[in-house]
Image: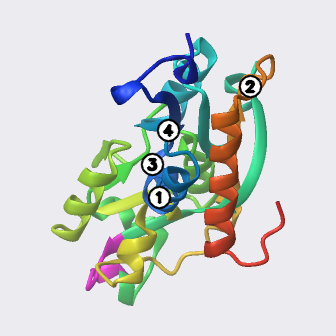
């Protein structure tokens, strides 16, 4: 039974959507507000987590849609992906961090690094990026996809957080966190909508997609969908 076939509180239909951390932080607040106006009789359930977890929940029918980065080919079998925009990885630190004045990627191992875990969409991109720049194994690291933990820990320590730009867009805009001036364009990749190809999208799911596109148009006027 998929989310839209379930009945939630007060007899409303239920739409279950998976959102990777960058999408949950950057896009979903605006999408949720628009969806509430467009589909007042549907309860939106937002589930966050790493790419592998959400895609598996989608494949099993526990989720109706997932929004996030395009994963490795082997993880996308049996999934339809429609690109919405592109995003890259950033190396993020607190304001006033020593590396901001003299950025040197090879020095990041001098501080604790918050690293994407296995199963996250950006993990292979980060691994390849560091190898290409001559950075070896980082021993002093912890691994998590938790945006809440990463924001707090990075602001109150000298840790370096390797994370998708969307996760920390608000914190960078307000100056609490800073992206190291390192060219990470090579990590840029597509973010999009995922669903099961053998299933006709419900009217609720189609309305949700309209809400997503409307939110993106506000954030990126003139974007081509």
Check whether the beta carbons of the residues at disc 4 and disc 1 lie within 8 A of each other: no
Of the numbered discs 2 and 1, the one sitting upstream in the chain is 1
How far is disc 4 from disc 1 in space, using C-alphas?
A: 14 Å
Q: Is residue 57 left or right of residue 215?
A: left
> Was residue 95 drawn as part of the magenta stretch in this picture?
yes
Query: Which residue carries the number 3 mark?
Result: 21
Query: Which numbered mark, 4 or 1, is in the foreground of this view?
Result: 4
Residue indicated by mark 1: 33
Earlier residue among tags 3 and 4: 3
The residue that appears at 59% across and 22% down in the rendered structure is 58
**Which callout, 2 or 1, points to the residue nearer the camera?**
1
Question: Given contact means CB atoms under 8 Å apart, are the residues at marks 2 and 1 in contact?
Answer: no
Cβ–Cβ below 8 Å for labels 2 and 4? no
Q: Which residue is mark 2?
A: 79
Q: Nearer the viewer, mark 2 or mark 4?
A: 4
Provide residue 24's location: percent of width, then percent of height. 45, 51
| Mark 2–mark 4 distance (CA, rounded to whole Å) | 28 Å
Give the number of callouts: 4
The image quarter in which residue 224 lies:
bottom right
The crowd level at tag 3 (other Cα within 10 Å; few <14, some 14-19, many 20+) is: many
Report x, y in % for residue 174.
34, 83
């Amino acid at each position: 039974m998929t989310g839209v076939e379930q009945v939630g509180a007060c007899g409303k239909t239920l739409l279950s959507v998976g959102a990777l951390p960058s999408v949950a932080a950057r896009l979903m607040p605006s999408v949720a507000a628009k969806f509430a106006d467009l589909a007042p009789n549907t309860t939106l359930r937002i589930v966050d987590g790493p790419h592998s977890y959400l895609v598996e929940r989608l494949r099993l029918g526990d989720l109706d849609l997932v929004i996030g980065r395009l994963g490795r080919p082997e993880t996308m079998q049996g999934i339809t992906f429609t690109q919405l925009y592109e995003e890259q990885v950033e190396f993020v630190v607190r304001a006033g961090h020593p590396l901001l004045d003299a950025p040197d990627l090879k020095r990041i191992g001098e501080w604790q690094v918050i690293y994407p875990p296995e199963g996250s969409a950006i993990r292979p991109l980060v691994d390849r990026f560091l190898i290409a720049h001559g950075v070896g194994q980082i021993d002093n690291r912890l691994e998590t996809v938790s945006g809440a933990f990463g924001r707090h820990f990075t602001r109150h320590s000298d840790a370096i957080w390797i994370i998708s730009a969307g996760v920390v867009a608000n914190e960078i805009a307000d100056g609490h966190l800073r992206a190291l001036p390192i060219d990470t364009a090579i990590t840029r990749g597509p973010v999009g909508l995922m669903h099961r190809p053998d299933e006709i999208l419900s009217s609720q799911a189609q309305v949700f997609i309209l809400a997503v596109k409307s939110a993106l148009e506000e954030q990126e006027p003139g974007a081509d969908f």
